[in-house]
């Protein structure tokens, strides 16, 4: 049932605005689009919003963007304020059930430049990518609660591309081992990300972890091998066995990789 707001402190215009938010199931909005969404014009819209915020019915997220006072969906808020973004990296790994570690930051991949910020006690990290890398999303939620999230394959590839946002290389190796991956999607997203070092690392893991269902991707990865040697873990020290077939230096040994994959949380 639509909510009715009775208060001597709320004007009829403010009551009508709140009622229409309920009728249209709008939880988050911007000043620039709310009248179009509600199909209604309000005199002194800025004053309405300011008063409803002061009275605790609305919360201001950032300049020009508001949400209902009890709305705190971090995924929706992060994607909404990014302009064009998707939940990604460590946050997506957690949502997809590929890590039990819970990040204390919400990671949002976006094609726009935006500084990290805290909103309602949550820290948002916006990672800017070129438009060609912004692929591989699914949509979750409904109405104004819709948000994008990178699918499992794109999440894995993004984390190998920028492992500093993955929660640690051990977690990332374990996630890759657990994930049910599609070869064609892996190939498509690797072409979009365009990082040969990532392709070599993923191909090597496919091989030693015996990912039989990823044979087409494994063949693709072998075709991308270049002459340069790369560290298997780019965030770790330069040491370890040289793997000629993959042009990788294993600063995490084969035994350590297998132990990581076999270790329970």
Image (tube, grey):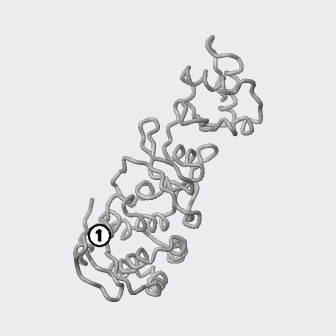
Residue at 38 percent across and 69 percent down: it is 176
Residue 85 position within the rendered picture, expressed as x and y whole percent measured from the top left:
56, 53
Residue 217 position within the rendered picture, expressed as x and y whole percent measured from the top left:
47, 81
Label total for image: 1
Residue 80 position within the rendered picture, expressed as x and y whole percent measured from the top left:
57, 46
Is 46 on the left-hand or right-hand side of 243?
A: right
Is 244 on the left-hand or right-hand side of 80?
A: left
Is 216 on the left-hand or right-hand side of 15?
A: left
Q: In the displayed structure, would residue 81 be above or below residue 183?
A: above
Q: Which residue is mark 1?
A: 261
Residue at 45 percent across and 57 percent down: it is 92
Is 209 on the left-hand or right-hand side of 217?
A: left
Where is residue 37, by image quadrant?
top right
Residue at the outermost top position:
8
Where is residue 246, by image quadrant?
bottom left
Look at the numbered disc 1 and give the secondary structure of its residue. helix
Task: Characterize the local packing of mark 1: few (<14), some (14-19) or many (20 or more) Cα atoms within 10 angstroms.
Answer: some
Q: In the displayed structure, would residue 4 be above or below residue 84?
A: above
Q: In the displayed structure, would residue 244 be above or below residue 118?
A: below
The quarter in which the C terminus is drawn is bottom left
The quarter in which the N terminus is drawn is top right
């Amino acid at each position: 049932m639509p909510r009715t707001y009775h208060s001597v402190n709320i004007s009829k215009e403010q009551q009508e605005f709140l009622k229409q938010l309920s009728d249209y199931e709008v939880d988050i909005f911007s000043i620039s689009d709310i009248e179009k969404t509600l199909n209604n014009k309000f005199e002194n819209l800025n004053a309405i919003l300011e008063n409803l915020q002061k009275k605790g019915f609305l919360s201001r997220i950032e300049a020009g963007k508001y949400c209902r006072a009890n709305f705190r969906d971090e995924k929706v808020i992060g994607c909404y304020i990014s302009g064009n973004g998707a939940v990604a990296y460590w946050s997506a790994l957690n949502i997809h059930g590929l890590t039990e570690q819970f990040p204390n930051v919400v990671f949002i991949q976006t094609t726009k430049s935006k500084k990290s910020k805290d909103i309602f006690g949550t820290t948002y990290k916006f990672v800017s990518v070129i438009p060609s890398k912004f692929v591989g999303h699914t949509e979750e939620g409904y109405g104004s609660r819709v948000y994008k999230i990178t699918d499992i394959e794109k999440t894995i590839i993004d984390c190998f591309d920028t492992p500093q946002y993955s929660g640690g290389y051990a977690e990332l190796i374990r996630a890759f081992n657990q994930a049910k991956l599609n070869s064609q999607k892996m190939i498509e997203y690797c072409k979009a990300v365009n990082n040969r070092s990532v392709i070599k690392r993923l191909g090597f893991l496919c091989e030693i972890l015996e990912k039989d269902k990823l044979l087409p991707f494994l063949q693709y990865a072998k075709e991308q091998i270049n002459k340069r040697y790369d560290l298997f873990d780019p965030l770790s020290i330069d040491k370890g066995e040289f793997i000629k077939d993959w042009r990788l230096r294993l600063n995490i040994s084969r035994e350590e990789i297998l132990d990581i994959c076999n270790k329970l949380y």
